[in-house]
Amino acid sequence: MLQEGTDMMIKGRIHSFESFGTVDGPGIRFVVFMQGCLFRCLYCHNPDTWDIKGGMEYSAEEVLERIRKYLPYIKRSGGGVTVSGGEPLLQVDFLTGLFTLCQREGIHTAIDTSGFPLYRTHPQFGENKPDHANNLSLKQNNRKIDRLLDHTDLVLLDIKHMCPEFHQKLTRFPNEEPLRFARILQDKGIPMWLRYVVVPGVTDDLDGLRKLKDFIRSHSNIEKVELLPFHKMGEYKWKELQYDFSLGNVPEASEEDIKRVEKILGIES
Ligand code: SF4
């Protein structure tokens, strides 16, 4: 109980809110875009969420106050609240506080994540190491994740690539953490929607997709697989932030590209 109170005092760094989201979970969603991400996905359309020290600080109660205005629509639609990003798991304590409050009011809770918790020290944090990154043991990390998942109804897990070396090239981190997170969800029986961005010539190789198919088959908690076609709508943000967008010459994913991947995964509609 004391711990719960502490979670609710912790402020979250938030990039922005969306009050009528329709693609991040069931029904109408109030979407909270958390600030901060350690990945650097080559296709990211929100590089403005990367800076861990950016955004604005809000308490869980302040966010809930915003959600309450839309509750009649949200509940009537079978919706809820989704925290997205950025990488929401970097702010696990804030999320636990927010979701605890939400569930008390009967609000469905979902996390849209790449499955990369903060509470592991990692050399690649480098200068970008967040203030609250620390040396907690794996056991302590797991306890924090456990407490968050106790208040989580659904996880939308973005798998970037099944091959560690491709994952590293794509995001600058190997995929060991996301896959470990997926196993935790499986063990706890938490419903998962799997998301995968199809980038022609980058994430649609046969080997990676076959491994993804095996992954889907081995996780009985996956309720839905969503293939997201690569697009370049966020390219202008890379330019504004003076980052080098290396996929400028890669074509956007066509309907045929998606159909081909669906076929390999055995999920044709
Ligand atoms: S995990 Fe999401 S926010 Fe982070 S770099 Fe990748 S696409 Fe962007």
Image (cartoon, rainbow, N blue to C red):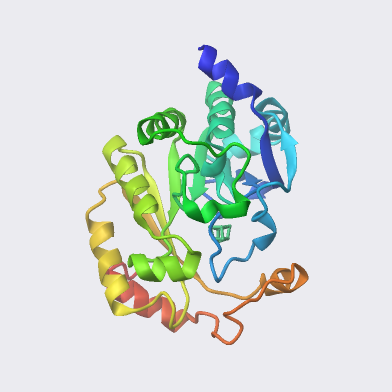
Residue 261 picture quarter: bottom left
Q: Is residue 149 in view?
A: no
- Image quadrant assignment for residue 184: top left
Taking the spot 35% from the left edge, 80% from the top edge, the residue there is 260
**Percent of width and height locating residue 179:** 34, 52
Residue 149 in which image quadrant: top left
Height in image: 106 above or below 174? above
Q: Report the image quarter containing ligand 1.
A: bottom right
Tally the marks. Answer: 0
Picture layout, residue 203 above or below residue 69? below
The residue that appears at 46% across and 31% down in the rendered structure is 148
Left or right placement of residue 126 versus residue 184 in this view: right
Residue 247 in view (yes/no): yes
Residue positioned 31% across, 67% down in the render: 267
User: Quadrant where the C terminus lies?
Assistant: bottom left
Q: Is residue 245 above or below residue 97?
A: below
Give percent across and percent down for residue 53: 70, 46
Residue 14, horizontal then vertical, whole percent = 69, 43
Q: Position of residue 220 (x, y in %)?
A: 25, 48
In the image, 38 versus 218, the foreground residue is 38
Q: What's the residue at 38%, 47% (across, down)?
A: 192
In the foreground, 126 or 101: 126
Outermost residue, top side: 2
